């Protein structure tokens, strides 16, 4: 295993997570202070997700014509430029939208290829642990973004300055660690499936990505609103988000270790069942704060586990160009879930006071249905093999 390349990819995805965690609330708060309405803030906040969706259609062409190092340098250069110019973009909503789109495209290509390359580096017996380390790197630094914003303030130029500096370090790291070779590439007709065909090939993995991107966007944007509407102070409601993502960050490595020692589709299904159960129970948990906090931690752990195990199973099942296509589909689905999650959950909260946990439970239940079918299919295949 190329440990030097792995270290470079882990640092690179950490910077991406850090910039996402810092810039999303920064842009929203700056627009709010400038008097923008909630619809405008919502549209601008959704633009990076739209950029990530677009990036899924660009990955194949990038791999055909550019080396791995060149792709990463272009992606991180685009991201750094988008962040560095952010301070001057708030006077023009169109420039701001363009910079956010550029950030989404750069991050999207980097994440899609990073997940593919890390999966290629993994020996099968350690795949769960290494992919969990990759997911933890992203989530851990994503949590640092809002923390830095809380310390420095939304109007401090140091926020964008620090993130821009981190992108500069990432560019240096890429030059030193990422090889200047081409991704192995088959002809279009030799691919087993297309972006759209990935759902037919691996429906449970598609729904897993949809669930987690839905969950991630909803927790960041609407969980504090839900908690304050049920009597919690704003600070306590914000702390709930921190606890959920702390669970995601802290428990991916133990889950990855477990994934290397038991049937992965079974563990995937168990994570879905726990997430669905906590979603169903959340309205009652609000009245039992002694139980609410540990279960929010557990909710973050199993929700993150659903995504991490999806990446592990993708690496286990697909190789070469199929692996790149599968991860491009993941990027596309992530964008869809990030866009749909707040819209569906916001509408559900308008209809019912506990619409948010209902939406999360239903989405987790949909994943459980597909994960159960996948687990049973693996069981039948093993029975035939025996």
Image (cartoon, helix red, strand yellow):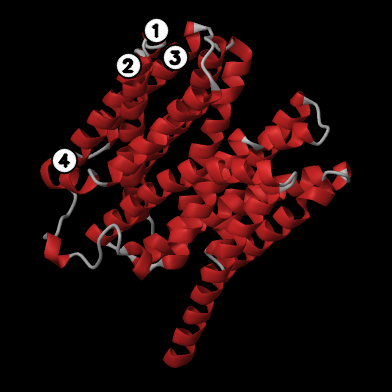
Residue denoted by label 1: 91
Residue 79 x, y percent position in the rendering: 33, 25
Q: Residue at x 57, y 18 (%)?
A: 148
Relative side of 194 to 182, left or right: right
**Element type where label 1 sits in the image:** loop
Are discs 2 and 3 less than 8 Å apart at CB? no
Give the spatial CA distance, label 2 vs label 3. 16 Å
Q: Residue at x 41, y 11 (%)?
A: 90
Label 1, residues with CA under 10 Å away: few <14, some 14-19, many ≥20:
few
Give the spatial CA distance, label 2 vs label 1. 8 Å
Is residue 95 depicted above or below 236 in this figure?
above
Residue denoted by label 4: 67
Return the mark for residue 160: 3
When asked about the image quadrant of residue 62, the answer is: top left
- Mark 1 or 4, nearer chain start: 4
Can you see residue 360? yes
Return the mark for residue 95: 2
Give the spatial CA distance, label 4 vs label 3. 29 Å
Relative side of 164 to 57, left or right: right
Most extreme residue toward the front is: 351
Residue 310 x, y percent position in the rendering: 47, 59
Is residue 116 depicted above or below 156 in this figure?
below
């Amino acid at each position: 295993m190329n440990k030097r390349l792995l270290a470079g990819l882990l640092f690179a995805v950490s910077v991406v997570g850090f910039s996402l965690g810092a810039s999303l609330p920064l842009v929203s708060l700056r627009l709010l202070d400038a008097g923008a309405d909630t619809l405008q803030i919502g549209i601008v906040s959704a633009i990076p997700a739209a950029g990530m969706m677009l990036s899924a259609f660009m990955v194949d062409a990038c791999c055909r014509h550019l080396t791995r190092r060149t792709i990463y340098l272009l992606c991180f250069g685009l991201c750094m430029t988008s962040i560095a110019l952010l301070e001057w973009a708030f006077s023009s909503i169109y420039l701001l939208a363009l910079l956010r789109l550029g950030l989404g495209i750069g991050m999207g290509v980097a994440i899609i290829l990073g997940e593919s390359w890390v999966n290629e580096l993994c020996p099968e017996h350690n795949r769960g642990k290494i992919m969990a380390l990759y997911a933890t790197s992203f989530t851990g630094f994503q949590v640092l973004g809002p923390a830095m914003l809380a310390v420095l303030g939304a109007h401090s130029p140091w926020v964008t300055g620090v993130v821009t500096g981190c992108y500069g370090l990432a560019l240096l790291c890429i030059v030193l660690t990422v090889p200047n070779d081409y991704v192995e590439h088959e002809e279009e007709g030799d691919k087993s499936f297309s972006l759209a065909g990935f759902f037919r090939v691996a429906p449970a993995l598609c729904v897993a990505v949809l669930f987690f991107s839905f969950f991630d966007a909803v927790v960041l944007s609407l969980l504090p609103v839900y908690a304050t509407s049920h009597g919690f102070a704003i600070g306590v409601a914000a702390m709930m988000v921190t606890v959920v993502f702390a669970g995601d960050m802290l428990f991916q490595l133990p889950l990855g270790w477990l994934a290397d020692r038991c049937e992965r589709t079974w563990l995937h299904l168990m994570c879905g069942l726990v997430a669905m159960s906590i979603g169903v129970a959340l309205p009652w948990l609000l009245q039992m704060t002694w139980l609410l906090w540990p279960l929010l931690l557990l909710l973050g752990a199993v929700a993150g586990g659903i995504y991490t195990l999806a990446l592990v199973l993708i690496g286990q099942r697909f190789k070469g160009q199929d692996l790149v296509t599968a991860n491009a589909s993941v990027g596309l689905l992530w964008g869809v879930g990030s866009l749909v999650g707040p819209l569906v959950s916001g509408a559900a909260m308008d209809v019912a006071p506990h619409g948010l946990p209902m939406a999360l439970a239903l989405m987790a239940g949909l994943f459980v249905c597909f994960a159960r079918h996948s687990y049973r299919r693996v069981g039948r295949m093993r029975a035939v093999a025996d």
